[in-house]
Image (spheres, rainbow, N blue to C red):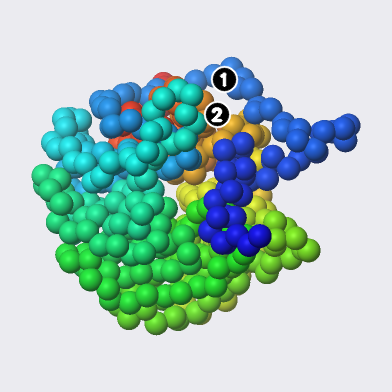
Amino acid sequence: MQYRASTLSGLLVLALVVTASGCSWFANKPDGKSKNFKPKPTKLVKIDREVKVNRLWRASVGRGLGRKFIRTRPAVLADRVFAADAYGTVVGHDRFSGKRLWKATIGKPVGNGWKFWDRRDPGFVTGGVGAGGGLVYVGTTTGDIVALSAADGSETWRIDIGTESVVPPVYDDGQIFIQTIDGRLLARDSKTGESIWAFDSQVPILTLRGTATPVVEDDIVYSGFADGMLVSLNSKTGERLWGHRVMLPQGRSELERMVDVDASALVEGPIVYVVSFQGRLKAVRRSDGRGLWEKETSSFLDLAAGYGQIYMVNEDDKVVAIDQESAEESWANEGLMRRVVSSPVAYNNYLLLGDDDGYLHILAQSDGRFLGRTKIDGDGLRSPFTVADGTVYVYGSGGSLTALEIEALN
């Protein structure tokens, strides 16, 4: 029997992500008696708090993110913050007061997923939320990209791109850039949704169910793909400027050969940093795509930067700081291993991460020590955080949208 690549990808990511980060599900028990042994999440230890977390406001957004490991990140535009649940609800809030300004519905779940004995989940909002040009952009499993007015939530346009996008559309200078699950990067007119250009990549037989979010800098789009490539494109024309192979597929099985670049590229001055699953962390020169250094590791989560360091969470949820110039490891924190950690976010001199139990963890960028911890959402914190003007916006898996400030304790 033959299976479509997308079907295999969906099955694989369910095993990879839901059970923990990366490939921990495939680990053997130390005594070799059980192939399905899965190490337990690291227990949280008591810490000496050095920071205080102030909750500015809290709101509820629909029914949350469900069981499909959907991660929709809050988006900030002017004085508003936007969020979407997995079931078609999109909201706009005043980002200073938390007052809800509008609520929109872009569709309804298909099928019955709400009975406790039915484990199916009808969540369908997977690509969200993007914002720019006065609009809010959301993608769905059915291939729709929907643009809503940032002012009142009314639908401005809707297009069918023919396949799913699991990351938010990215706005820049009158265009939106959409990365799809089948290896395409699309540029569309932000006001109308009309096509401007499209870039196609080769999709391996087996991939993680995820893609990188495109990054636009100085009229150049950087994005990684499931074949292990980082590509630089002219944002106006789609012309490929260069491609850099982050990792060459190796091994005899398709599982061993997976080298997806699902983490967004991180642009820091003249360098772009990129990491792949079962591959490497690399520093690449933006001008010509030449590799400057590399370090063997594995991750599918976005990178962060600060204090001259690159921060990453590997497939075992170990948090690591790498010196941007020397590629030497500055520090490592193993206190969150196997806790299904979110992408790290640099904030002032802190590093922020969420976990599957709903805790916000605050680490020091200087040495990786724990500075604070607070529980935000009992259903978990899997979505990346959004930081704007000193405020951290956290969208919990249970549907809570929270605005926070962090201050040092004297």
For label 2, count other residues whose C-alpha is less than 10 Å away and answer few (under 14), some (14-19) or many (20+): many
In the rendered image, the vertical position of residue 124 relative to residue 192, given as above or below: above
* Residue ID at (14%, 38%): 102
Residue to which mark 1 is pinned: 47
Mark 1 Cα-neighbour bin, 10 Å: few <14, some 14–19, many ≥20: few
Mark 1 and mark 2: span between their CA atoms? 7 Å
Between residue 239 and residue 304, name the one nearer to us. 239
Q: Secondary structure at mark 2?
A: strand
Q: Mark 1–mark 2 contact, CB under 8 Å?
A: yes
Left or right: 282 as drawn, with respect to 107:
right
Number of marks: 2
Which mark is first along the chain, 2 or 1? 1
Residue at horizontal 36 percent and vertical 64 percent from the top: 162
- Find residue 248 and report its horizontal and vertical position in percent: 68, 69
Q: Residue at x 61, y 36 (%)?
A: 19
Determine the residue positioned at 29% across, 46% down.
Answer: 75
Which amino acid lies under the numbered mark 1 shown in the image of this protein?
A: Ile
Q: Nearer the viewer, residue 201 or 4?
A: 4
Is residue 388 visible in the rendered image? The answer is: no
| Closer to the camera in the image, 258 or 88 | 88
Residue 190 position, x and y percent, is 21, 64
Against 30, residue 173 (above or below) is: below
Q: Position of residue 194 (x, y in %)?
A: 23, 71
In the image, taking residue 250 as reference, residue 261 lies left or right, namely: left
Quarter containing the C terminus = top left
Q: Which structural element holds mark 1?
A: loop
- Which numbered circle lies on residue 370? 2
Question: For the N terminus, which image quadrant?
Answer: bottom right
Position of residue 66 in the picture relative to residue 192 (left or right): right
Give amino acid for label 2: Phe
Residue 349 location in percent, x, y?
Answer: 45, 40
